[in-house]
Amino acid sequence: MVKYDNASLYAIKQISLTETDDLPLSDVKTIQKQYKIVGREIELDCALAAIRAKKHIFFEGIVGVGKTVIANALASYFKKSFYRVDGDERYTGHKLIGWFDPALVLPKGYSLETFIPGPLTQAMMEGSFLFINELNRMPEGTQNVLLPAMDEMKIIIPKIGALEAKPGFLIIATQNPEEFVGTSRLGEALKDRFVWIRLDYQSEEEEQKIVIKETGYDKEDLVAIAVKIGRTTRDDVEIRRGASVRGAIDIVALMQQLSKGSINDPDVWVKASIMALATKIELRDEATKKIDEVIKRIVTTVLKEASEKTPKKKTR
């Protein structure tokens, strides 16, 4: 029989704990592979833990970081139906819960048979996922409709009564940062019912992989420049909101059509970048240049830096 001293036993225990902590990564890798998600290991691991703990999830992050993609992948992975609602100041609680069909109510009265379930009710009836994109764009009254569904797993449908959610019902909501136009603060009571997962911009290398995946274009030099242009917009002094990876995706897609095989023409880069980025960035109020001028300056700088890093061919 092998004997271990206390130090050895402690080391074995630590190894065992580490291995146990790493087990969820197999699920993460499965999701990455099945749904072609680049990176996001930590965020996916947290989301899986939340779902298994039966907690509603609140993803916060700027536009274009993949909040919807991850939510969709999670629903598919857990074999759940996915009901989507896009936040809007005109979206009412009535739409969220459902309504009675007037044509059916007249002959049959108020009953489940004449009730048209909204996405919240439908998800509860099936034990499915309700995905609310940009929850902070919904009116406070509509937000409050979610409270009993999240707290007690039930809602009251007028003229019918209480409806209890089937096991597996879950709400996944997203929010863009509050400094963006058209958003409002969520009530403390509603936020208290969620667990929070932040989604930031991904690394430069991961963004390059995403662009290649989305465009099918594997010329790394061109992709690297497009990604660099997009990322530079996030730190420019005249830009309030920079471009997500979608900017680089669109630049690459346009370059394939505009460059006619040559990727070294600065004018083509500027044209493609203005087309791709002008709708994806927002200038500061104090900006002194027009949006196309700012983009042209960024593109010119990035191309210059790229050319300086490229080894020059020796002439004989």
Image (cartoon, rainbow, N blue to C red):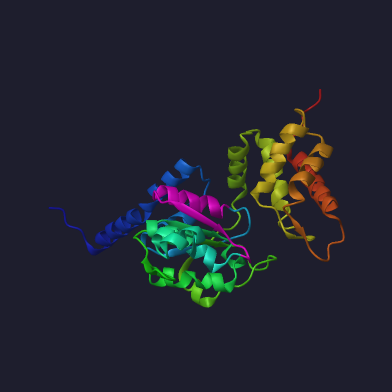
* Vertical arrangement, residue 8 with respect to residue 297, above or below: below
Tell me if I can see residue 197 in this picture.
no
Horizontal side of residue 248 vs 206, given as left or right: right
**Residue at 77% across / 50% down in the picture?**
278
Name the residue nearer the viewer: 316 or 230: 230
Report x, y in % for residue 37: 51, 45
Q: How many marks?
A: 0
* Vertical arrangement, residue 219 with respect to residue 194, above or below: above
Q: Is residue 83 magenta?
A: yes
Magenta residues span 66-90
**Residue at 44% across / 64% down in the picture?**
56
Name the residue nearer the viewer: 303 or 71: 71
Report x, y in % for residue 267: 84, 38
Farthest left residue in view: 1
Report x, y in % for residue 151: 41, 72
* Vertical arrangement, residue 48 with respect to residue 309, above or below: below
**Residue at 60% across / 73% down in the picture?**
185
